[in-house]
Amino acid sequence: MDIGIIGLGAVGLFISSKLSERHDVTGYVRNQKQLNEIRENGIQINKDRYQIRVKTIERLQKHDLIIICVKQPHLAYLMPILNSLDKTCLLFIQNGLSHIQMIQELNHFIMLGVCEHGVSKVNSHQVQLNGLGQIKVGDFQEHNDAKHIQHQLYASDFPVFYDDDIIQTMNEKVIVNSVINPLTALFDIENGQVITNPYLKKIAYQLSKEASEVLEMNCEKSWEKVQEVAHNTKNNVSSMLVDIRMKRTTEIESINGYIVKQSKIDVPTQSNMYHLIKAKEINH
Ligand SMILES: NC(=O)C1=CN([C@@H]2O[C@H](COP(=O)(O)OP(=O)(O)OC[C@H]3O[C@@H](n4cnc5c(N)ncnc54)[C@H](OP(=O)(O)O)[C@@H]3O)[C@@H](O)[C@H]2O)C=CC1
Ligand SMILES: CC(C)(CO)C(=O)C(=O)O
């Protein structure tokens, strides 16, 4: 397949490299320095090197599939650029849920994805794989072809699965992120401490409960999932903590902000997380 990948951060670099083994991959970046470094060094994951074509975003062209791996705050900028392309398949891989509204306006076949790999960016052309997980993809609208595309993307060392209820899976993930991400970002701690510190664990439970009520999910199952992810990724630095450390805008609007906006009931712990992270962002 001819595949374009927008955003060569942790997730984009990882996906581009793995797909480049079987597909024709073009990565799109927004700064010339990163472009030069990838052209010069290729992409490095742990000790392996991969070569892909790389261009700046202004030169985006149509591909059979375009995978969008930028963070939520950067999606709005891409909307007119994507809409100027002839109709094709777009796959959005973001944490959070606020993009669901935005992408409805796109005149393309749209798929959504959930990334469960643990990857962190070492520098502009190098990522570290902390844990091989999987990617789940599903159709956003009816009559799409996510199953067919999933089949083409799948490889045993790069598992991609079809999910016939991707929104449900994204709801489950946003609950986990609404607990782990702000707590780790506020206290500058690794994921595991959210459940090993007894005081934080109480707040974590309250966050999980509020989010589950708003999204009409089973509270106990959600809490089990939060604990499972916190345990399995106990030594990870969450993506929100990475953003806070790098003094970048976080995805709080699309995670806790989304839950607060969706809520018809009072969700004080979720609302507090939202305001505390926004307060930290102001200091950047
Ligand atoms: N990292 C992880 O393990 C996981 C991440 N996710 C989710 O995946 C998404 C991506 O995360 P992650 O890869 O960690 O994020 P990163 O911040 O590492 O990467 C995002 C990349 O997008 C680039 N970018 C932003 N705007 C543009 C643009 N207009 N054109 C081209 N490139 C652009 C950024 O460029 P620049 O460097 O120039 O700013 C950056 O390289 C997020 O929603 C995240 O929550 C989900 C699961 C796990
Ligand atoms: C699951 C978790 C919390 C893993 O770090 C994540 O998705 C993130 O950091 O955004």
Image (cartoon, rainbow, N blue to C red):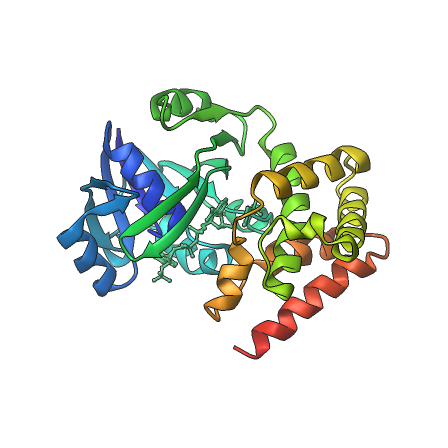
Relative to 9, residue 134 above or below = above
Q: Position of residue 223 (x, y in %)?
A: 75, 39
Q: Residue at x 58, y 45 (%)?
A: 234
Relative to 138, residue 211 above or below = below
> As drawn, is 236 to the left or to the right of 91?
right
Relative to 23, residue 5 above or below = below
In this view, which residue lies farthest toward the bottom? 283
Q: Position of residue 284 (x, y in %)?
A: 52, 77
Q: Residue at x 54, y 27 (%)?
A: 142
> As drawn, is 78 to the left or to the right of 228?
left
Q: Residue at x 64, y 67 (%)?
A: 277
Q: How many marks?
A: 0
> As drawn, is 101 to the left or to the right of 108?
right
In this view, which residue lies farthest toward the right? 265
Residue 249 in sight from this viewpoint: no
Q: Position of residue 110 (x, y in %)?
A: 46, 36
Relative to 92, residue 191 above or below = below
Residue 114 in sight from this viewpoint: yes
Where, by quadrant of the figure, is residue 220 drawn?
top right
Where, by quadrant of the figure, is residue 63 drawn?
top left
Q: Quadrant of the N terminus?
A: top left
Q: Residue at x 47, y 31 (%)?
A: 134
> As drawn, is 223 to the left or to the right of 148?
right
Q: Position of residue 189 (x, y in %)?
A: 60, 59
Task: Out of 144 and 57, give the one closest to the viewer.
Answer: 57
